[in-house]
Image (cartoon, rainbow, N blue to C red):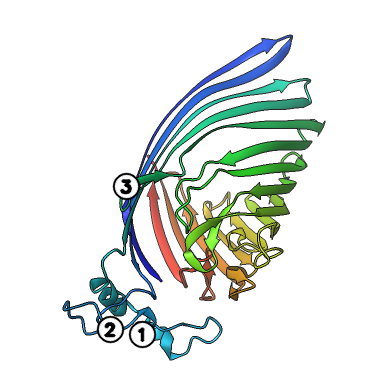
């Protein structure tokens, strides 16, 4: 089946916040009160050409007779595409649409409004202990999906949802080491429909995070280490039988760690290190997906490193250079038991820069992807990234 969607997506939003810093019962309170209004109006036209639609391969409009979709494109194997892969091209698709039978156009319209109120308070319980209390209330109104082909509105509903958040920061060693933890229960209202035309329900999430922040040796080394655990239900994902459409079911669990370190061991020398590990799995979804990593989860591990040095005195003052690398483990573009796995390979990218920074101007030269490594990011979109690239810039300071 081939789809040709087109349409408009218009949104209007108004938000107002009221902030305050005051003492209540002798404790400092930093308050935020707010109201939010969001209106979304979507109009989409789907032109469909499927295996059940007949067309005339000669291009004649004298009767829609001839063959089916597979007579033009055939079925393509993921593991062994073969020569039939090249039958699927722009010329073939355009011909199929030009001669498709009547009744293959679907017009869908959706209209939603969200009214929100939220309040947050950061309380200084002591000099070393700060707590956060927050609550958001949403009234979500989905006026349903209008199918112009039948002039029937379906799947409309109204919902009130509450999203609390709690957090704390405790300075174990003032200005040096702090412990933090937070919990939040949230949701995301989803516009649109699934592959069957049913309106999406809100996605719901529970998140727990804890970690430590540090600033050591009078700022020479700083950073943070954190652990998180997230469970999302009613997730919207690509429909495995047609990745261009969506389905909403099941639960996704993600947990992992994030590390960031910034160091300035000597004057002019700067080091930045970042690392992330994410273990994500589908649970309670289907036998086709349970236990597998979602394509939306991205690589399991990410690593970035950047080292730079700037000369701060002498005739070469302002001259500097830097070098770094980015690493990512493999990523899934397709990952189901029925279709198998289509993997975007792991990659290592090396970059370098040279600059001359003066009071009134800055000259810069940077080379990205020095090794000219082909790599892709994203999930099912499989976006190819830039190969070796050399850029130069001039900045004037006034």
The quadrant of the picture occupied by the C terminus is top left
The percent coordinates of residue 328 (x first, y second) are: 63, 66
Query: Which residue in the structure is indicated by mark 2?
Result: 66
Q: Earlier in the sequence, mark 1 or mark 3?
A: 1
> CB atoms at circles 2 and 1 under 8 Å apart?
yes
Q: Earlier in the sequence, mark 2 or mark 1?
A: 2
Q: Above or below — where is 221 with respect to 287?
A: above
Q: Residue at x 26, y 66 (%)?
A: 102
Q: Residue at x 52, y 56 (%)?
A: 319
Q: Residue at x 21, y 85 (%)?
A: 58
The percent coordinates of residue 308 (x first, y second) are: 60, 57
Q: Real-space Cα distance between discs 3 and 2?
A: 32 Å
Q: Secondary structure at mark 3?
A: loop
Q: Residue furthest right?
A: 172
Residue 166 as seen in the image, left or right of residue 194: right
Q: Earlier in the sequence, mark 3 or mark 2?
A: 2
Q: In front: mark 2 or mark 1?
A: 2
The percent coordinates of residue 325 (x first, y second) are: 61, 65
Query: Which residue in the structure is indicated by mark 3?
Result: 151
The image's mark for residue 71 is 1
The percent coordinates of residue 32 (x first, y second) are: 57, 22
Depth check, front residue: 261 or 395: 261
- Res 275 quadrant in image: bottom right
Whether residue 344 is visible to the viewer of this picture, yes or no, is: no
Q: Residue at x 41, y 71 (%)?
A: 1
Depth check, front residue: 184 or 59: 59
Q: Residues within 10 Å of mark 1 (few under 14, many from 20)?
A: some
Residue 213 as seen in the image, left or right of residue 151: right
Q: How many marks?
A: 3
Q: Real-space Cα distance between discs 2 and 1?
A: 9 Å
């Amino acid at each position: 089946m081939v789809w040709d969607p087109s349409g408009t997506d218009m949104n209007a939003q108004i938000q107002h916040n009221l902030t305050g810093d005051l003492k209540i019962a002798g404790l400092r309170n930093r308050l935020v009160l707010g109201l939010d209004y969001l209106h979304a109006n979507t109009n989409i036209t789907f032109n469909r050409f499927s295996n059940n639609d007949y067309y005339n391969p000669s291009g004649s409009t004298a009767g829609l007779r001839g063959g089916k979709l597979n007579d033009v494109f055939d079925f393509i194997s993921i593991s062994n595409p073969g020569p039939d892969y090249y039958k699927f091209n722009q010329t073939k698709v355009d011909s199929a649409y030009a001669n498709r039978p009547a009744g293959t156009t679907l017009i869908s319209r959706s209209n939603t409004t969200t009214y929100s109120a939220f309040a947050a308070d950061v309380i200084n319980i002591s000099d070393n202990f700060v707590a956060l209390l927050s609550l958001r209330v949403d009234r979500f109104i989905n006026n349903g999906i209008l199918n112009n082909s039948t002039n029937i509105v379906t799947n409309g509903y109204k919902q009130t949802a509450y999203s609390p958040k709690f957090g704390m920061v405790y300075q174990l060693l003032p200005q040096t080491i702090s412990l933090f933890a937070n919990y939040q229960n949230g949701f995301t209202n989803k516009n649109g429909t699934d592959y069957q035309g049913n309106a999406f329900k809100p996605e719901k999430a529970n998140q727990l995070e804890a970690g430590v922040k540090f600033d050591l040796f009078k700022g020479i080394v700083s950073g943070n280490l954190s652990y998180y655990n997230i469970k999302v239900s009613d997730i919207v994902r690509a429909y495995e039988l047609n990745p261009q459409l969506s389905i909403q079911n099941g639960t996704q669990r993600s947990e992992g760690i994030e590390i960031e370190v910034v160091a300035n061991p000597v004057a002019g020398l700067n080091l930045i290190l970042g690392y992330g590990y994410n273990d994500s799995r589908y649970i309670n979804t289907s036998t086709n997906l349970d236990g597998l990593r979602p394509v939306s989860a991205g690589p399991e591990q990410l690593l970035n490193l950047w080292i730079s040095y700037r000369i701060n005195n002498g005739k070469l003052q302002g001259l500097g250079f830097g070098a770094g690398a980015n690493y990512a483990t493999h990523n899934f573009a397709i990952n189901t038991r029925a279709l198998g796995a289509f993997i975007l390979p792991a990659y290592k990218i090396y970059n370098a820069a040279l600059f001359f920074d003066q009071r009134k101007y800055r000259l810069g030269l940077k080379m990205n992807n020095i090794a000219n490594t082909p790599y892709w990011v994203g999930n099912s979109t499989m976006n190819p990234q830039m190969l070796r690239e050399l850029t130069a810039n001039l900045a004037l300071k006034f």
